[in-house]
Each structure stands twice: as C-alpha cells, then as structure tokens.
Amino acid sequence: MVRLFIGNYAIFGYSTIFFFFAPYLELNGFPSAMTGWVISAFYASSILVKPVAGSILERFGVRKSMLLAGGLGLGSGLMLIVSPLAFVPLFLLRLIMGLCFGIFLVAIMAYQNIAVPDSQRGASFVLTTIGSVCPLFTLMPLCDFLISSGNHHLYILAPAIMGMLCTGLAYSLKRVSTIHESKDEAWGTYRDLFNKAPIVALTISILLFAFADASIIYVSSLSFAKGLIPSYFMVAFAGGSIFIRIAGRNYFNRMPRTLLVAPSMISMAAGLLMGTMVSSNLLLAMAGFIYGLGVGYGYPAHLAMAGDLLPISLRPKGTSFILFFMDLSWFLLPLYMGYVSAITDIVWAYRLLAMVTLVMAGVIHIMWVRYQRKESGHGG
C-alpha cells in the first residue's frame, strides 16, 4: 500500500513539476508563441497512448511496463537538463514525457486493480490516490520558490529525480499474477470489454465527472475575477479530498462504487456553484472543501471500476479506457471555458457547468442503479 502511495505521488509529481515549465521557458528567453505547443505536447501524447497502453501492459507485463515508463521518464528528464532551449528538442522530449506519464499511470492503476483483493480494493484506491494530491502541498511550493528565486538549474533537475523515483518504485514492486495463472485463457479484446462492461453508463460517468474535475485549472481565473485569492480554494480542495479519503475509507469499501458517483458529482457541483457566489476568501475556502469532498470519492471510485466491473483479463484495457476518457475531458474543458467565457464570462461558465453537472448526476445515478439491479437479478 505504501509503495502504491509513493507511485501515485511520483507520477503525479512528475506532472505537477511542469505546471511551472511555461514561466521557466519564458524567463529563459523561449518564444512565448512556441511555449503552448511545448506544454501541450505532453498532454497530447498522454491521451494518444491511453488506448494502446492496455496492450502494452499485456505484451510486456504490468511491472515491466512501469519500469519502461519510469526509464523513459528518467531518461527524458536527464536529457532535458542538457537540452538546448530550442523548439524541436523540447517538443520531442515533452512527447516522450507524456508517453511516460500515460503508460505509468495506466500500469500502476492496473497493478492495483489486479494485485489488491476485491474486498480491499475500494479502501486501497482511496488511500493510495492521496498520493496524487500531495504534490500540491510539496512540489508546487518548492517549484514556485525555485522559479521565483532564480534557481532554475535546480528546478530543471526535478523531472529526472521524479523519473528516478518512478523507476525505483516500479523495480521494488512484486510481480503480479499473469493471465496464464488466472482462470481466463487470454487477455480480452476491446470487443470483449464493450460486451462485458456497461459501456454507455461508464463512458458518460467518466466524461462528466472528469469534466467537473478538470474545471480546477480555471479556478484561479474565477477567483481573480471575483477579487479573491485562488490558493484558499486550492488548499481547501486538497484538504477536503484527503479528509474524505481517510475518514470515509471503510464506507468506500462497503458501498458499490458505482453508487458513489452521483453524490460525488453533486458535491463537486455544489462547491463550484458556491464558488461563483462567494465574496470572501473564507467562503471560497469552504466552497473548495465541498468540491474536494466530491473529488475525493469520485476519482478513486472511477479508478476502482476497472476491477469492480471486469475480470482480470480485461482490467488493463478497462484501466486504459477509463483514463483515456478522463484525459479527454481535461482536453475538452479548456475549449468549453474559452468559448463560453467569451460569450458570457468566467462566472457564468462555471455556473452553467455546475448546473449541468447537478442535472446529469441524477441521470447517471439512475443508470448505475439500473445496472446494479440488473446484476443483482442475474446473481439471483
């Protein structure tokens, strides 16, 4: 459990470091017009590798895939240290780093879905995914300090350090049972996945949850528009997310994870809606905490579904499927915010998102309740 926590911290820390890559480049004279392409390359390759990441896991094994991804992260991090500040080498390195992130993330989630017993899976995801939040408290302030204080040579070492941590963590994990040791005869195909899983409910559930989750990247814009300080929301959001995962970890094991999705989305929508109406930093922090409660349950609930809904033979592809649509929402959210904010403003863009999320939470809940009843009927 501790190693999986560290793995989540390492791979999300690897991504968090690059929240400050744009100012690093611009402060070192890199053309602003090219910065966006370099930053986006990471997310583009991470999205594109998700559909095939499951096949990579099946071909090389889960642990070896993690080692491969960690090695890519370490190697590209070391190359970044000596790379010239030119578009082509930086763009290519960011593509490789996105591949590292995408493969490692799918691999560690698949490892957990396979290695952890069904009875412990919910609480396991609740606790280990706290590691994905911790970089907000640790690496973000550190990187902010290194950039603002001019210690750019120390900042640029950070990706290689996190890549080394990913590689060491992967090496330390025990080998999980292969498909040949399970009751299944072979890895399943995507056709098997679509036949076995409640694919419509799962896709809609992931997309809408992740869309509300991705809205966090524009909270600073919302806060500034209201004359407030974004960090109040962000710190409270992280606190609420960690609190619910620790305090409610046993309940998370007892409830069907599919039935936790709607309450999580309602909490997120309520937090976002409240954030558009507050006029003080204290109330903004309360909104962030409520939003964090929803994310704290909703994120691990969706990750655990690959194990909850699918046999071992389909869990690598199921994990790829879930993470692909999560990434897709993170790609689409900025487009939504850009267009709707241009028509109205950032406040109403958030309000519309919150209201749609509230309505769709009810629709998704009905879909999951019907699925649970159907499964219970088959079981009887």
Image (cartoon, grey):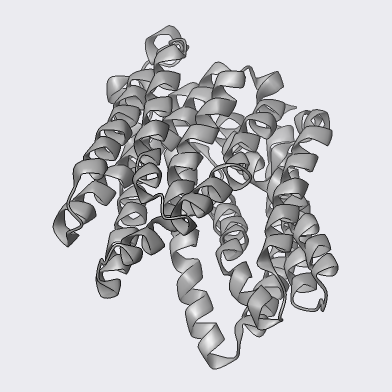
Looking at the image, residue 244 sits to the left or right of residue 176; the answer is right
Asked if residue 166 is positioned above or below residue 19 in the image, the reply reads above
Residue 52 is situated, as x and y percent measured from the top left of the image, at: 31, 40
Looking at the image, residue 96 sits to the left or right of residue 293; the answer is left
Q: Quadrant of the N terminus?
A: top right
Snapshot quadrant of residue 302: top right
Q: Observer-nearest residue: 199 or 340?
A: 340
Question: Would residue 248 be seen by someone viewing this image from the given angle?
Answer: no
Asked if residue 64 is positioned above or below residue 276 in the image, the reply reads above
Question: Would residue 180 be seen by someone viewing this image from the given angle?
Answer: yes
Q: Residue at x 61, y 82 (%)?
A: 346
Residue 303 is situated, as x and y percent measured from the top left of the image, at: 58, 38
Q: How many marks?
A: 0
Asked if residue 150 is positioned above or below residue 62 in the image, the reply reads below
Q: Residue at x 77, y 64 (%)?
A: 271
Q: Residue at x 79, y 62 (%)?
A: 285
Q: Residue at x 27, y 24 (%)?
A: 59
Looking at the image, residue 193 sits to the left or right of residue 262; the answer is left
Outermost residue to the bottom: 343
Snapshot quadrant of residue 55: top left
Residue 31 is situated, as x and y percent measured from the top left of the image, at: 25, 71
Q: Quadrant of the C terminus?
A: top right
Residue 123 is situated, as x and y percent measured from the top left of the image, at: 72, 28
